[in-house]
Amino acid sequence: MKVSDSIPSVLGLPEKFSRLSRRLLKLRLPLERRFTGRDILLCVLATVFLVLSSFKALSGLRLPLRIVSVLAAAVPLCLQALRLIKQRSFPAEETAYLLAAGLCALTRDSMSPALILIFADLLSIAEGYCLLHLDAAPDTLKDAKLPMRQGVERADPEKSPERRALASISFGFFVVFAAAALVPGICVFFHLENYVPWLRRCACFLTLASPSAVLFSSLLTHFGAVFSAAKADICFSDNSVPERFARCGIFVFSKTGTVTDGRFRITEVSPSGMSEQDLLRIAAIAECRSAHPIAEALRAAAGLDPASVPEEAISVKEIPGKGVSAFFSGHQIYVGNAGLLEEHSIWYATPEKSGSAVHVAVDGGWRGYVMISDEIREHAFEALEELRAQGASSVVMLTGDVRSAARRMASSLNFDMVKPELSPEEKASAVRYLRSVHGEKARIACVGDGVHDLEMFDASDVSVCLEPGKDAPQAMVTVDSEDILRIPLAYRICRETERTLFFTAVGLATAKLILAILGVACILTPAAAAGIDCALGVISVIWALTGLTLERRAGT
Ligand code: ADP
Ligand code: MG
C-alpha cells in the first residue's frame, strides 16, 4: 500500500470521518513515515530524563538520579551524532541543534540538552507531516488532466530544482548564525572562571541557526500555489512561476480567441465574379490545414471536411497575423486580411461596412471578401477588472485584427491601450516597447490563445495561454478551460503566495532577531530559544499548508 493511500489528508478527506477522528489519524501520520527507531529512543530517553529531573530534589535518590540524568542527556546526543556520522550527511538544522545540545551538556545543565533534542524532533515531525501531504497531493488530482498532474509532480519540493537553490540560501542563513555563535564561543576562553553564560549565548545562537522553518515554508508555499492552481485547471510550468507571475504589473492580451470567444460568425459574403458558395468553398479549401478560429469558421460555413482534401493535392503556407497562402489544382490562392493582399500587390475593394474582412484572391485576382465577427468572451470584462483589482497597473490589447474591430472590443472592455493590425513580430516589438516605456523593472505577462503567439510569448516575462493551441504548448501558465476568469484566479493565487512568503520570511527573521537579542542578554535560555524556534517553525509550516487550498479562497 502506498503511503498516500493511508493518509487522511486535508486535501481530500473522506466525508465519513468525523472531525475528531480525522485529527487523531492525522496526528498518527508522521509516525508512519518519519519516526524511526532512533527518534523514538530519543524521545523516550529525553522524556524519562525530564520526568526524573523533576524528582531531583528527593533525598536519597541523588546519586543514581544523577547517573540517569547524565545518561539520559548523553545517550540521545551520542545517538544523534552517530546517526549523522553514519549517514555522512549533516543537515544544517540538525547539526545546529546537536551542537547546541552538546554545549548545554557542558554547562552541566542536563535538562536543556533533552529539551533541545525534543524540540528538534518535534520540528522534524512537523516537516514529516507536510511531506506526507505533498506525497498525497498528486493522488487527489486523479480527475485532472495529465499536464496538471505532471506540473504538480514536478513541483514536489523533494525533487524540484528550487529546493537546491533554497537549500543553499538557508545554508547561508545557518552560516551567519553559526558565525555569530563563534563570538561568544571565543569569549568562553577569556572567561574561564565564569564560562556558563557564554556557552549559553553560544548555544542560543546555534538553536536559532536552524533554517528548516524558512526552507520548509517557502518550498511548501510554492508547491501550494502550483497544486491549488492545478485543482482549478491551471498549469504552471514550474514552481518559479508563482513568483514571476505575481510580479507582473502589465497584462498584454491578444484579441482573437482570448478576449473574444474565437467562434466567428459570417455576417456577409461578397463575391466578385463567382457565386457566394464558390467563394466560401475556395476560402475553406485554402484554410483546410489551419487551426486559426477564422479557418474553422470558413470550413464550417462551406461544409468542408478537411480530411476530404488529400495531402498531396494541396500545399499550404500559413502567414501568421495575415492569413494563408495555398497552392491547389494549379491555382495560387490567398485568404486573409488586407495586409496579405497588399503584400502581394493584389488590388481589392474596401468593404463598405466596417469590420473584419477576409479577402480571397485566386491567381493574383481579387475574388471577394467574407465579413466575419466574433463575440466578447463571457466574463472578459470581469476578468480584466479583477486583474486590476489584484494590482495590474495596465491592461493592453495587441491584435492582428483591423482597427475598427479592435477599437470596438477595447472600448467595451475598458483596455488602457490598444494596438491593431500587428503581425506576431510587431506584437513582440510592442511588448518590448511597453517595457522600455514602463522601465526595465516592469514585468509583462502576455495572454494569448496560443495561435501565432510564440513571438509575443518570447518577449514577455510570463506567457499565459488560454486553451492551449498547437503553437504554444510551452506557455508558463496554461489555462485548460474556456473560463477567462481563471486568469485573474491564477494571478491571485500567485499574489497570495508571495504575500504569504513575504510575511513568513519577515516574521521569522524578526522573531529570530528578537530571540537572539534576548539570548545575548541571557534573558532566554537555549532550551527556551529552541522551544520558541520550534513553535515558530511549526506555525509557519502550518500556515504554508493553508496554501494547498488557495484556489478556494482566491475564487470567492
Ligand atoms: P489576434 O492578434 O487578435 O489574436 P491573430 O494574430 O490570430 O489575431 O490574427 C490576426 C489577423 O490575421 C486576423 O484578424 C485575420 O485578419 C488574419 N488571419 C490570421 N490567420 C488567418 C487565417 N488562417 N485566415 C484568415 N485570416 C487570418
Ligand atoms: Mg491570437
Image (cartoon, rainbow, N blue to C red):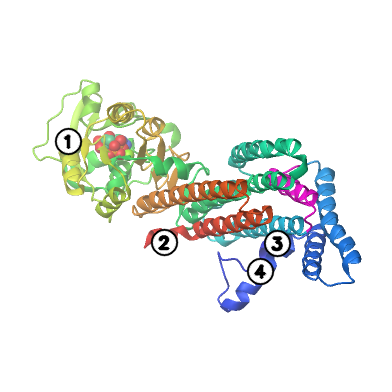
Q: Viewer-proximal residue, 281 or 136?
A: 136
Q: Is residue 533 left or right of residue 103?
A: left
Q: Amino acid at mark 4?
A: Leu
Who comes first in sequence, dot 4 or dot 3?
3
Q: Viewer-proximal residue, 179 or 65?
A: 65
> Which residue in the protein does label 4 denote?
27
**Image x and y of residue 377, in percent:** 27, 52
> Which residue in the protein does label 1 denote?
403
Q: Which mark is residue 3?
A: 3
Q: Amino acid at mark 1?
A: Arg
Say whether marks 3 and 1 touch (CB < 8 Å).
no
Q: Nearer the viewer, mark 3 or mark 2?
A: 2
Q: Which mark is residue 388?
A: none
Q: Name the residue furthest front.
A: 193
Who comes first in sequence, dot 3 or dot 1?
3
> Which residue in the protein does label 2 denote?
553
Q: Amino acid at mark 3?
A: Val
Q: Nearer the viewer, mark 4 or mark 3?
A: 4
The question of residue 108 being in magenta is answered with yes
Give the structural element (helix, strand or loop) at label 4: helix
Q: Nearer the viewer, mark 3 or mark 1?
A: 3
Residues rendered magenta in the picture: 90-110
Q: Quick one: quadrant of the C terminus?
A: bottom left
Q: CA distance from mark 4 to mark 1?
A: 63 Å
**Ligand 1: does it lie within 8 Å of the C-beta at label 1?**
no
